[in-house]
Image: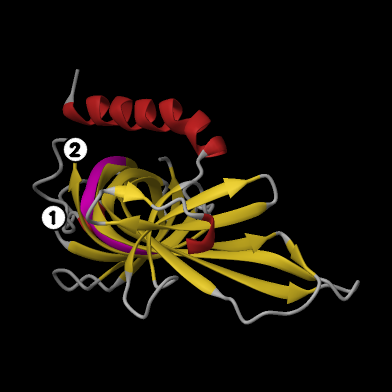
Amino acid sequence: MKLYQWLIICVLIVILSSCGVVRTSPKYQLANGYYKSKTFSSKTEKVYVDNEVDTIFIHRYDKVTKLVDTALNKRVVFPSRLAVSINNSRSFRQASFDVDFVSMPFKYRPTQRGFPQQFNTNLNGAVYLGFRNDVYQIKYKQSPLKKYDRQVTHYGFSFGVFTGIGGSAINPWVTNNVVGYEYDGVVWAKGVGAFIGINNFNIGLAVGFDDLLDDNKDFWIYQQKPWLGFAFGLNLN
């Protein structure tokens, strides 16, 4: 079995095995766990978030005892609804390792060997691995009933690397007239990307390199040449 066939199989296994995780992933929610926040002081410190029915409780983490402080008078409470407005907005940050499925629907290729710049839209898919920071903000918004409902806004930032499989048009013009026919070649894509996440959907920019995976790779003018892509991502973990 050829290398590109193994790569295609690996990408499909990762995507299919993660589909169930995507549907239930809590990353885009303010789930129970440890976060960084200024809830208790002007300095960013470790806190623990606890979701109970319709109320979110924030507990301080004691660095000396390595335990969560559960004292009732030392916690901050965010009920789902308030009768009066309060200035009690708080933000929480959490760092994590990111695994995404990404696709670059648009690739910009600079001029190569006198051939003009290209804007490609070939089908492709890749697995992305990176470091991510998620930020959650709790605030209250007034409803038509004159009540104040709790809202949790989320966004994330991620930077990492990707690798995957795609396609590219192979013809005489992109092979210096060495290949006298046209076909869609299979390419191995890899590179780096930066993403902004909104819930479990990510958009960003990627810089990558393609390797044509057949015998015409030595003639392809874009072999291992950089391109700039607009990327979409779906969080898998």
Could you tell me if the residues under marks 2 and 1 are in contact, i.e. CB atoms within 8 Å? Answer: no
Report crowding for label 1: few under 14, some 14 to 19, many 20 or more residues within 10 A (C-alpha): some
Where 14 falls versus 179 (above or below)? above
- Point out the image quarter for the N terminus: top left
- Residue 24 in the magenta stretch? The answer is no
Q: Position of residue 13 (x, y in %)?
A: 36, 25
Residue carrying label 2: 213
Could you give the CA–CA distance between mark 2 and mark 1, rounded to whole angstroms?
Answer: 11 Å
Q: Is residue 24 left or right of residue 204?
A: right
Q: Earlier in the sequence, mark 2 or mark 1?
A: 2
Report crowding for label 2: few under 14, some 14 to 19, many 20 or more residues within 10 A (C-alpha): some
Residue at 50% of width from left, 38% of height from top? 22
**SS under mark 2:** loop
Q: Which secondary structure type mostly characterizes the magenta part of the structure? A: strand
Where 30 falls versus 165 (above or below)? below
Residue at 38% of width from left, 46% of height from top? 100
Q: Residue furthest right?
A: 145
Segment colored magenta: 185-196
In the image, what residue type sits under mark 2?
A: Leu
Task: Give the image quarter of residue 143.
Answer: bottom right
Residue carrying label 1: 224
Q: Position of residue 115 (x, y in %)?
A: 22, 70
- Give whichever of 176, 228 is nearer the camera: 228
Q: Position of residue 178 (x, y in %)?
A: 15, 49
Residue at 75% of width from left, 67% of height from top? 149
In the image, what residue type sits under mark 1?
A: Gln
Q: Residue furthest top?
A: 1
Where 128 falls versus 10 (above or below)? below
- Residue 192 in the magenta stretch? The answer is yes
Q: Position of residue 50 (x, y in %)?
A: 52, 49
